[in-house]
Image (spheres, rainbow, N blue to C red):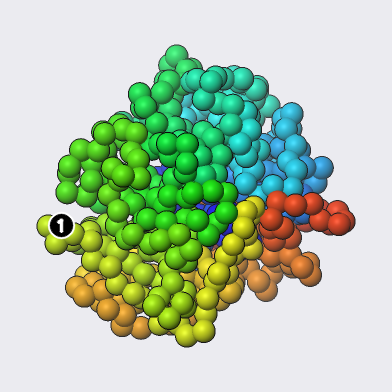
């Protein structure tokens, strides 16, 4: 896709990843938000921000500090920090301005030495990367022209920070363009303040004819990193096909689900195909989300067309020697999301990963045409037990955050347990094309859990 980040950002993925900040793991699109806050949240203004289209902002929360990165009212990338216990914001603006492209989101991380890393505003563009010289001080951010390989950093999209198995900061991105790109991984040495390639070769290779759109890696209860992707033949969204999977213990050596080694780079011929969904089969990149059942088995939530041409939700579960068990979750009639073309789409459907509910149930949450829905599955058979209204942070904030006409509310939630989030209204994606006018800026809000009344 690139889907419009007009409902929520891929936080379900970031939560599973344990990424270093609330920048998604594949941050290429959007999925339903986390379940919302237990009580009424507190809201506080951070800044006035660009609202012409949504390019995802970034949030990182440490034990002591909140860091945010966003595009201000003049479209300039801004990084701000504030103590968690309260107080004023410290702001710093860097030399980068966003256009109309919703792909140009921001990724932010804090490494083990406390240094801040910010990458963003790239869609098949050269590297835009900043790092602090003084730990925790956003005003010491400086532009760094090269991370690990200047030759591979000329056409970058989808930056993601995550934490590797040894606790080191890992950075991944796509090198190339939609329909023709490779997945690159780098790793950071905080003592030497230097990035280096994590993989000797790209993770995947489209062989000049296609590229892979990833979700993950996600660290599972089995201590393995799980990754899923679709192959895409061109910039046109309808050319996604062949849901694929790999796993790794160290992000370097990758295998199929049965442990068979995969030689890098993985190609469409060597990949493990979970579901051979054809081109124009109703499957889109970024709506292929990893989760786990109560036994810790990996599951993938996605959508495709059924035999009647309706869009339906499906799950695939790795059942060991039995292979992948694919089950249809929804049974919608007359609903068909027939996406086509390039650019950021105004998406009708977002899916999240499987979540265990007790020992014998699984929850699959989706948002269809703005309405949160929860499917409850029997963990043994994957048969649907119930379909009930779901919840979202956007729905919870609806009564207290004004959203101007023609706009939608975006959120980014902390990947940890703080309950802290960001919320701001923007216009939805417009295929990455300019609008006929410039909307007024909107307010970026810090959302924190409300104080519980004493008993």
Give the residue drawn at x 38%, y 62%. 277
Check the image and name the residue furthest to the top: 192
296 w.r.t. 265: above or below = below
Residue toward you, 160 or 169: 160
Whether residue 16 is visible, yes or no, is: no
Q: Residues within 10 Å of mark 1 (few under 14, many from 20)?
A: few
303 w.r.t. 420: above or below = below
Residue toward you, 51 or 339: 339
Residue toward you, 274 or 80: 274
Check the image and name the residue furthest to the left: 321
Please give the residue where the numbered disc 1 appears in the rendered image: 320
Residue 32 drawn at (x, y percent): 50, 63
Give the residue drawn at x 52%, y 44%. 179
Residue 341 drawn at (x, y percent): 62, 58
Check the image and name the residue furthest to the front: 209
Task: Tell me which corner region of the image, top left, top right, bottom left or bottom right, holds residue 6.
Answer: bottom right
Q: Secondary structure at mark 1?
A: helix
305 w.r.t. 97: above or below = below
Give the residue drawn at x 51%, y 39%. 180
């Amino acid at each position: 896709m690139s889907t419009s980040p007009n409902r929520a950002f891929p936080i379900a993925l970031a939560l599973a990843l344990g990424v270093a900040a609330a920048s998604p793991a594949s941050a290429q699109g959007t999925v339903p938000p986390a379940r919302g806050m237990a009580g009424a949240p507190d809201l506080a203004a951070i800044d006035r921000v660009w609202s012409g289209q949504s390019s995802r902002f970034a949030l990182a929360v440490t034990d002591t500090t909140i860091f945010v990165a966003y595009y201000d009212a003049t479209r300039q990338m801004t990084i701000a920090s504030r103590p968690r216990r309260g107080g004023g914001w410290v702001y710093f603006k860097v030399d980068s301005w966003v256009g109309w492209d919703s792909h140009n989101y921001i990724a932010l991380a804090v490494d083990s030495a406390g240094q801040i890393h910010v990458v963003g505003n790239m869609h098949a563009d050269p590297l835009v990367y900043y790092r602090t010289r003084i730990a925790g001080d956003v005003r010491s951010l400086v532009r760094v022209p090269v991370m690990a390989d200047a030759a591979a950093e000329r056409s970058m999209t989808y930056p993601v920070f995550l934490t590797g198995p040894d606790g080191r900061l890992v950075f991944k991105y796509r090198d190339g363009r939609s329909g023709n790109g490779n997945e690159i991984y780098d790793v950071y040495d905080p003592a030497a303040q230097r990035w280096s390639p994590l993989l000797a070769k790209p993770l995947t290779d489209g062989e000049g004819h296609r590229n892979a759109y990833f979700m993950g890696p996600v660290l599972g209860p089995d201590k393995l990193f799980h990754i899923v992707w679709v192959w895409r033949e061109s910039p046109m969204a309808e050319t996604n096909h062949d849901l694929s999977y790999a796993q790794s213990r160290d992000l370097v050596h990758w295998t199929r689900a049965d442990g068979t080694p995969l030689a890098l780079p993985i190609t469409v011929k060597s990949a493990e195909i979970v579901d051979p969904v054809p081109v124009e089969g109703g499957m889109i990149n970024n709506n292929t989300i990893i989760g786990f059942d109560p036994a810790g088995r990996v599951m993938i939530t996605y959508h495709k067309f059924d035999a009647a041409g309706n869009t339906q939700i499906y799950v695939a579960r790795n059942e060991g020697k039995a292979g992948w068990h694919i089950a249809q979750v929804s049974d919608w009639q007359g609903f068909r999301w027939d996406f086509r073309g390039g650019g950021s789409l105004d998406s009708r459907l977002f899916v999240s990963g499987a979540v265990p509910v007790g020992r014998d149930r699984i929850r699959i949450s989706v948002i269809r045409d703005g309405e949160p829905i929860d499917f409850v599955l029997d963990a043994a058979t994957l048969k649907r037990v119930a379909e009930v209204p779901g919840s979202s942070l956007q729905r919870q904030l609806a009564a207290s955050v004004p959203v101007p006409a023609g706009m939608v509310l975006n959120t980014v939630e902390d990947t940890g347990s703080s309950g802290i989030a960001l919320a701001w209204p923007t216009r939805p994606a417009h295929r990455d094309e300019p609008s006929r006018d410039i909307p007024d800026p909107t307010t970026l809000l810090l959302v924190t859990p409300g104080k519980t009344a004493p008993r």
